[in-house]
């Protein structure tokens, strides 16, 4: 019998509490879910190991210049494989996409949550979700056949009006505009509008009506209430949604390959020039005819973009989870 | 003492106000007068339309998509639903405090006070003075004067509600509408807000919805008793001096309600 050290009196005996499943059916159900769940983790681990093992020959021979250099010559006597322009290109296209998609997505979410009558809002939501269901190869084909000619005229107008800004400057108008990061950015924007819209819509619909009523009762207009109350209250959730979109944009492959000229002559920010980069697209473009040496380089590229996407997604879920602490009470 | 220019109180009155949500009529022919510098309590059982009526007085009612209205609401003789009147101007003259304290969570205490001016696009002259005056009028200045930069949500529930009152006062309203402002608060906070209401009635007209009979008797000069029978729109059963309505009610239904026999 246990005795309390201070008072010397007997402590009550603790009983054993059943924590696990009791019935036979429950036990099997528990095991089955545990195995399935663990299988997913094992799969991810195996993929990472596979990537790392195959990437190692390139990573060890190229070192840090794999990330920052700009030469891709896998079949020389001493192979040189440096991913810089592709990695930077992914970032440039990703950010262009986010920049173009965010205003569209926030407007769409505001329209759906606050302006449209319920039935119309349901239809609008379905249409935007359908956009997410389109295979990226279809969007890529649409990008070549339909959107590129339109985007080229937009690009020319931007160049004429804003050419004095370095971003919109081109060296030679005759060899620019087609297959540019500008067009790839738009294509990526189309693909990530649904995810940013759906996160933003969710955040908006969780808004406390009391705050909006309070703001209107103080003499707020639709716009001022949106800008001073709705947007600040939702900002961290929206940023999380934007990062989720960025994560998708960085991994986008086939649609970008269709509309962007991949080049190892690095393009830092001249979005209207006909050259750019995208890691995933580069892997797809080269994989079919890669020698064993280049195969390892492409695996290393895959590992790098995987880690970058993983980091972006982790930051995104961290921000989304931390969003609006006052909602929790 | 602060030198604040407060707007003079206004008389608010309604003429044959009827209200619908879609096809359902929820109020019929409400005729009430809220004289300047008087506190009027609106009492009645849940669902009798008194909060809905309150929302017709600052044009918040029309924000509900299916909302319908007949009759007139006169602020110093001017119909606030007239096509020439801007709803924003109405809401600036007729302030509102809600049942649940709703300070803006992303703003500091100070920013909350100034939020009405920013939301309505008004110029802010001498912000410090306005913040202090408004907080003093809501009797919360001494509690927050050293922490004006703190988040509004760091305050207790009762303090948040007084901050919301101060936020309305910063707009210098002629009329203040209060929709069960103490129902989410403890007795101590309730008492302090009731004292504030009494002080404010010197400079404005106040209409307060309350479920608390004692509160109606403590704070109001006149009382309107709303009632809606099943499937019929709400009406005002009795309206008069608060003392008379509670002590010598004319209508037997008023007598039953104020003595706790139903509702």
Image (spheres, coloured by chain):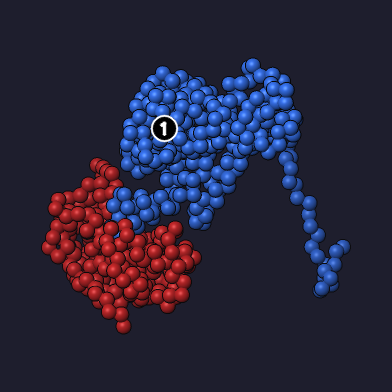
Where in the figure is residue B5, as x and y percent of width and height? 24, 74
Horizontal placement of A284 versus B202: left or right? Answer: right
Where does the N terminus of chain A fall, quadrant-wise?
bottom right
- Toward the top, the furthest residue is A289
| Mark 1: few/some/many CA within 10 Å (<14, 14-19, 20+) | many
Which residue corresponds to the image point at 38% horizontal and 54% vertical from the top-left?
A229
Tell which residue pokes out farthest to the right in this image: A1
In this structure image, what is the colour of chain A? blue
Instruction: Looking at this view, name the residue that lies furthest to the bottom.
Output: B1
Q: Residue at x 20, y 49 (%)?
A: B69
- Front residue (pair B123, A162): A162
Q: Judge whether B102 appears above or below A191 on screen.
A: below
**As drawn, B38 above or below A277:** below
Parent chain of label 1:
A
Q: Colour of chain B?
A: red
The x and y percentages for residue B161 are 40, 66
B63 on left or right of A144: left
Find disc 1 in the rendering and name its residue. A170
The answer, for residue A136, to whether it is visible in the render is no
Q: Residue at x 19, y 54 (%)?
A: B86
Instruction: Measuring from the top left, give residue B101's x and y in whole percent.
Output: 40, 62
Does B178 sit left or right of A132 as displayed? Answer: left
Q: At which x and y percent is residue B215?
A: 35, 71
Q: Quadrant of residue B120?
A: bottom left
- Residue at 57%, 29% (x, y): give it: A264
> Which SS class for mark 1?
loop
Q: Nearer the viewer, residue B21 or A139?
A: A139
């Amino acid at each position: 019998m246990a005795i309390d050290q201070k008072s010397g009196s007997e402590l009550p005996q603790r009983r054993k509490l059943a924590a696990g499943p009791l019935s036979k059916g429950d036990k099997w159900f528990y095991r089955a879910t545990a195995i399935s769940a663990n299988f997913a983790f094992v799969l991810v681990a195996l993929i990472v190991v596979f990537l790392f093992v195959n990437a190692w020959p390139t990573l060890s021979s190229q070192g840090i210049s794999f990330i920052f250099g700009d030469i891709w010559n896998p079949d020389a006597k001493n192979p040189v494989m440096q991913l810089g322009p592709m990695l930077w290109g992914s970032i440039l296209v990703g950010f262009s996409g986010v920049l173009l998609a965010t205003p569209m997505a926030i407007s769409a979410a505001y329209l759906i949550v606050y302006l449209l009558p319920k039935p119309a809002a349901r239809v609008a939501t379905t249409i935007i979700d359908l956009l997410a269901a389109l295979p990226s190869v279809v969007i890529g084909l649409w990008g070549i056949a339909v959107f590129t000619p339109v985007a080229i005229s937009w690009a020319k107008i931007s160049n004429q009006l804003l050419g004095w800004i370095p971003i919109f400057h081109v060296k030679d108008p005759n060899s620019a505009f087609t297959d540019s990061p500008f067009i790839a950015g738009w294509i990526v924007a189309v693909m990530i509008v649904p995810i940013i819209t759906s996160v933003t819509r969710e955040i908006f619909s969780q808004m406390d009506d009391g705050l909006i009523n309070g703001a209107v009762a103080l003499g707020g207009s639709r716009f001022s209430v949106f800008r001073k109350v709705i947007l600040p209250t939702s900002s961290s959730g929206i940023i999380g949604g934007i990062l989720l979109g960025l994560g998708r944009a960085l991994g986008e492959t086939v649609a970008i390959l269709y509309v962007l000229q991949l080049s190892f002559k690095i393009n830092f920010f001249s979005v209207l020039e006909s050259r750019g980069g995208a890691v995933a697209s580069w892997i797809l473009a080269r994989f079919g005819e890669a020698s064993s040496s280049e195969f390892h380089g492409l695996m290393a590229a895959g590992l790098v973009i995987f880690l970058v996407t993983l980091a972006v997604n982790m930051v995104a879920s961290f921000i989304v989870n931390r969003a609006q602490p006052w909602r929790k009470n | 003492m602060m030198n604040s220019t407060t707007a003079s109180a206004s008389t608010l009155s309604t003429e044959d106000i009827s209200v619908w949500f879609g096809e359902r009529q929820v109020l019929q022919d409400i005729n009430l007068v809220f004289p300047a510098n008087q506190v009027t309590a609106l009492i009645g059982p849940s669902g009798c339309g008194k909060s809905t009526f309150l929302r017709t007085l600052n044009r918040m009612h029309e924000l509900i998509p299916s909302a319908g209205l007949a009759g007139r609401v006169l602020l110093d003789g001017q119909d606030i639903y007239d096509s020439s009147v801007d709803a924003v101007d109405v809401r600036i003259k007729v302030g509102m405090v809600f049942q649940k304290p709703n300070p803006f969570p992303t703003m500091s205490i100070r920013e909350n006070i100034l939020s009405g001016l920013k939301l309505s696009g008004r110029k802010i002259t001498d912000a410090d003075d306005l913040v202090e005056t408004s907080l003093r009028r809501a009797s919360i200045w001494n509690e927050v004067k050293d922490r004006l930069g703190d988040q509004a949500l760091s305050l207790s529930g009762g303090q948040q509600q007084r901050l919301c009152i101060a936020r309305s006062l910063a707009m210098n309203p002629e009329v203040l509408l209060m929709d069960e402002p103490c129902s989410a608060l403890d007795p101590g906070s309730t008492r302090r807000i009731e004292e504030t209401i009494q002080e404010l009635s010197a400079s404005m007209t106040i209409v307060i919805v309350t479920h608390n009979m004692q509160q109606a008797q403590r704070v109001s000069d006149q009382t309107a008793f709303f009632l809606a029978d099943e499937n019929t729109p709400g009406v005002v059963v009795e309206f008069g001096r608060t003392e008379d309505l509670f002590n010598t009610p004319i209508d037997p239904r008023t007598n039953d309600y104020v003595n706790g026999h139903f509702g």
